[in-house]
Image (cartoon, coloured by chain):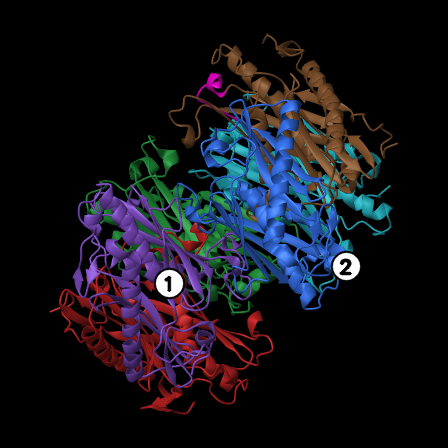
Chain colours: A green, B red, C purple, D cyan, E blue, F brown
Amino acid sequence: MRIDQRESATMRVIAFETNVNKHAEGSILVSVGDTRVLCTATVEEKIPPFLRGKRQGWINAEYAMLPRATAQRTARESVRGKQTGRTMEIQRLISRALRAVVDLEKLGERTVWIDCDVIQADGGTRTAAITGGFLALVLAVDGLIQSGKLTDTPIKEGIAAVSIGKVGQELLLDLCYEEDAAADVDLNLVMTSSGKIVEMQATGEEATFSKREMLDMLELGEKGIEELLRAGQDALGASWWYVGEEVGEHR
Amino acid sequence: MRIDQRESATMRVIAFETNVNKHAEGSILVSVGDTRVLCTATVEEKIPPFLRGKRQGWINAEYAMLPRATAQRTARESVRGKQTGRTMEIQRLISRALRAVVDLEKLGERTVWIDCDVIQADGGTRTAAITGGFLALVLAVDGLIQSGKLTDTPIKEGIAAVSIGKVGQELLLDLCYEEDAAADVDLNLVMTSSGKIVEMQATGEEATFSKREMLDMLELGEKGIEELLRAGQDALGASWWYVGEEVGEHR
Amino acid sequence: MRIDQRESATMRVIAFETNVNKHAEGSILVSVGDTRVLCTATVEEKIPPFLRGKRQGWINAEYAMLPRATAQRTARESVRGKQTGRTMEIQRLISRALRAVVDLEKLGERTVWIDCDVIQADGGTRTAAITGGFLALVLAVDGLIQSGKLTDTPIKEGIAAVSIGKVGQELLLDLCYEEDAAADVDLNLVMTSSGKIVEMQATGEEATFSKREMLDMLELGEKGIEELLRAGQDALGASWWYVGEEVGEHR
Amino acid sequence: MRIDQRESATMRVIAFETNVNKHAEGSILVSVGDTRVLCTATVEEKIPPFLRGKRQGWINAEYAMLPRATAQRTARESVRGKQTGRTMEIQRLISRALRAVVDLEKLGERTVWIDCDVIQADGGTRTAAITGGFLALVLAVDGLIQSGKLTDTPIKEGIAAVSIGKVGQELLLDLCYEEDAAADVDLNLVMTSSGKIVEMQATGEEATFSKREMLDMLELGEKGIEELLRAGQDALGASWWYVGEEVGEHR
Amino acid sequence: MRIDQRESATMRVIAFETNVNKHAEGSILVSVGDTRVLCTATVEEKIPPFLRGKRQGWINAEYAMLPRATAQRTARESVRGKQTGRTMEIQRLISRALRAVVDLEKLGERTVWIDCDVIQADGGTRTAAITGGFLALVLAVDGLIQSGKLTDTPIKEGIAAVSIGKVGQELLLDLCYEEDAAADVDLNLVMTSSGKIVEMQATGEEATFSKREMLDMLELGEKGIEELLRAGQDALGASWWYVGEEVGEHR
Amino acid sequence: MRIDQRESATMRVIAFETNVNKHAEGSILVSVGDTRVLCTATVEEKIPPFLRGKRQGWINAEYAMLPRATAQRTARESVRGKQTGRTMEIQRLISRALRAVVDLEKLGERTVWIDCDVIQADGGTRTAAITGGFLALVLAVDGLIQSGKLTDTPIKEGIAAVSIGKVGQELLLDLCYEEDAAADVDLNLVMTSSGKIVEMQATGEEATFSKREMLDMLELGEKGIEELLRAGQDALGASWWYVGEEVGEHR
């Protein structure tokens, strides 16, 4: 039995609150257990300099934590004068993950900014940010289609992310903070609705692991991803686009 | 009639959601119209170096806006590498305001951090931050009393803040964003439950104003402050401490 | 009796030394008691990016203190790597104040930089900077008129600033450093030659104040402003432009 | 056939030049094809603040590229004023990897800094840095043993790293720059001499991959790791410590 | 004839105004022609960390220019977020120069900060800063002696600095800005009252020079140094300490 | 006898390894004793903004030390967030020196970046950087000529640099680290193949020196420069350009 009474292969409660911000082109408040991340999508009708003349768009994610998202207050990065390595690593991961399921040429010469701000942290903030960031992106793309700026969705399929860990001798799905802090091995999995892997980062924390353990963790992750994708589909309702491996219709 | 159908002396809808953060010693989500500020209070059992040996505590506020709190996305200060002058000015204001109603010696040698993060902005974010930050502080002090770290409240009286402006020839209470952007004169008022002024900043934006106009704006502000204090009292319920000009009981 | 033998409503000695810098388009060394601020005006024939296409000019002030302007040496902001919140707050105040008396369209598409460098500090440096910065601006505008770049002055009226404070139970005009450090309430007043308020910032330092006290402080301030404006007029002599509420002639 | 005539499962030429720096406690110039990374180990007889009282040591790696390590000159991070996200991500990876094979308590209260400076880049700089950084660490530990500061090696086993990629439909071991730039999927594998995984990062670059492909890449990687470990063993000669899965003798 | 009618070996007008700052332990406003540098000396009763336990003091100089010291306004280093290379180079030079004539052990465990702020620039600001900074230091040391903190002066001899240049085919003493901008070779000479060299920096600006020219410039410089030292001696009057090569009496 | 058995006028062993970097347009690994500096030249077909419209090119040098180039590990400037004053001073010196022997108009509208990275430091890194940076520049210019981008060399003559010092009562050529640390006077000499001085910086470290000593050090330096130029000529072989005082042929 886990600290919060879950089975090893059980996800925490997943919830998505849509359109929580009146300004953003898309917004989602994602909750996975006590982890809550506010994800907003901003459509900007320009592209970064390095894409000039390439006739494509871009997805750029930023990630941050409010100072008291954590049990101990964390100093603001704006006060420190720079982002930490952890923050940079996470926002690079989110950006890459989302770009993997978007046809950037179809998106057109525009940038979608995905801002993932952790309101409350309890483990798995980066994976929640990917899962929620994707839904905010879907809502923003819906808006582009409804306003006629896009005729067809550039989104190729659904995507979600989850963490799995080895705590003591147990392999556990969807780690909460206490489990994450105690884990010897940590695996972050980003996967699409067609079951393809986008990113898989398995890390020993002053520890190592076998190929067998890695495969078992992967299997746990696949189960979690499926639940997350299904919950996302439910949250977006009629606007959602995906059944099984096929990309569905926008409204 | 105002853009949102209010009378000139009518406040927007005020709402306080308490204990919205499981980690913080005190937390409030304050809404004034569409402006929403998440205020958390963190108790830290140490004091800044300049207070060493002075046998007193400290209150320190920080303020920030999420990138998409605004109609146009605002670049993160952590990415820019520093806080803007506006941010610094606002957090100095919040800090001073809250310290004015706290007996810092009674607080003891500890620091209370008040983090005010603007989730959604629609005018009056700095005044909402003061109003909500104070309630988060009350909750944190309640906790110190309940845990026996304090026997008596160091809070001397209630405090709240509101903006008033001159838009065209009209004097208006509690400006929303459109009004704020159009205002020639902007007055931010911070006042206590005993009707004393803590801070009053009246500013002409490429414009000037008469003493008469200043006094009329002040009067509008007094009305708004009273509503805000009453709403705050209701929100904190039995834990609240103040009736009329007297400081009441903690539970 | 005050620490320097003044009555409560008496200003310190005011002095303006004009054209103290051979490079600047306008320059003033303003002394108010032992506070000395070197103000230079620089005319730059371009405008900041956010004003492109708006057919108007801009006034931008910067403020700094030499390291040993103060009793204790203050570390250089260039060494710290950033300006303090106090500096940013002050230079935003100076900029706003000066823009309030300038017709920015009449100024044309140019920027006037007002640099206010505190050579020696003894209280009231921000108000001295506004008072002196305005005179440097007048001199720079004179130059634009004499060189034919402007035919008519864009300056709408005179402006000056002064501080007033509550020290113990006394309300005092034009605080020196010791008074400022001891004050419970501090009011900075920026006012025009026609008696209009541009900015009024009344601040309780861990203290509060009544509306009555605020009005009494305002009255003291009005007296000080009048003396400052008169002294400024004398300093600029024939080039000066103002009698009573009317804007006079440039040479 | 690959761009440099290799088979898909063939490593580039591996070379280690030992003791290339007269100051460092351990130093290695590692070459993998045209990628050359200078790795130095510095023993510092103190620990970072967060380890106070924990009776253990620490390994901290830093990574950088010389400006002209790359085909196009890269601006110095010291001139930009900060490290890039890529740099931070890489040095966090190297640090974690090396800590996984060191018994930090046995190391004692000291820090070993591993500096990995890329002299010339041609793909796989982060994996070369891990492979070489480990050998520099071994040399530094040898020194600690020889000088009597340590009696027993804190190194638990050997470690090396390699990249594998999917380029078009091919899975390729040890990517050179051109292959890396063209790869749809990139897998960085860090593995120990006992065949355990320390870190495995598989990333789709605007692409996805199947579990099957991941496993095939892993298998290629295992082959490369073995060659790297063997070459490292040869380079350190008599001082080396490892045969098969067992940890051998220090001289 | 030079642009300002001087002979090639003639210094500009030298003036020292003493005790221009009421807070500093020593202060001098030095003028050399139109170059004016405000030099203050601050005595701090502590030493930098690297001198702990060495039983000696330290001299540390900082240099800056006011934004409008120059013909074109120069952006503030505090706004840029860092000091320029030129500033750093100059303040390192001033620091070294002053330390060369002070017995740091005799100074005791204290730091003297020399702040050199250029009020107006017209060539030779770094040399004027050395010349004036030294006099500010003398005044601060005088204060230490008068207050009984020192019994004997740690100043070994006088010091001053001057620039010499090659403009066209002419060798000129004490360059003004126009000459400095046109010079092919620039020599900054720092020399003591006993005729010893402390620092000599001769620099070709996209040009070279012969040993003969260097020696001729040096000779011009010696003449200038002597005038500067004499003028400094006159300015400090009875407090001054030096005749010929001997160190004189403090008052 | 010196610490490394040299006579006072004897240079350390000089070695140049050419074309050590496959990406750079020119590259040299220069060794002077145990000091090793990697110099690369990068040709960039654009010019800095301040040269727009001046029909000339530019030479810009950057200098840095690897963390463990030194006996004690030096913190990275990228981690500190800025370059030190020492670094800035040195790279300004290298840049000026190289520009002195290049006809910038003949170079055409392009920039040559000279990166000097100290791999191992043992005194004289800045002078080795000039000596080696020049050879890297020659190789890059050779490339421009061979590719037809230049028809004629813009290099006017050869250049090299050396340090001389006064250690105790001895004047010594080409100081190693121990000598440098013990030196009272330090002279860095930059000279051309025609015997002209480009830069001469003689500095007393809390010490002074006579004109006689300066001239004797200069003479030692001339000897060292000649050896360095000759060694450079040998290293570049047929591509070299200089015999005696005449500029020779490029291949």
Q: CA distance from mark 2 to mark 1?
A: 47 Å
Q: Is residue A177 visible?
A: yes
Q: Position of residue E234 (x, y in %)?
A: 60, 52
Position above or below: B224 against C147: below
Quarter of the image that includes the C terminus of chain F: top right
Q: Secondary structure at mark 2?
A: loop
Identify the amino acid type marked 1: Ala
Identify the amino acid type marked 2: Arg
Q: Which residues are magenta?
A: F104-112
Q: Position of residue B35 (x, y in %)?
A: 29, 66
Chain letter of mark 1 equals C
Residue position for label 1: C15
Report the mark closest to the observer, 2 or 1: 1
Q: Position of residue E77 (x, y in %)?
A: 47, 48
Q: Observer-nearest residue: C29 or A8? A: C29
* Quadrant position of residue D229: top right
Q: Tag 1: Cα neighbours inside 10 Å, few (<14), some, or many (≥20)?
A: some
Q: Secondary structure at mark 1?
A: strand
- Is disc 2 in the same subunit as disc 1? no
Position above or below: B180 against F146: below
Viewed as shown, does residue F104 lie left or right of D101? left
Q: Residue, x 62% and y 56% (percent of image)?
A: E237
Mark drawn on residue A248: none
Q: Position of residue E154 (x, y in %)?
A: 73, 56
Residue position for label 2: E55
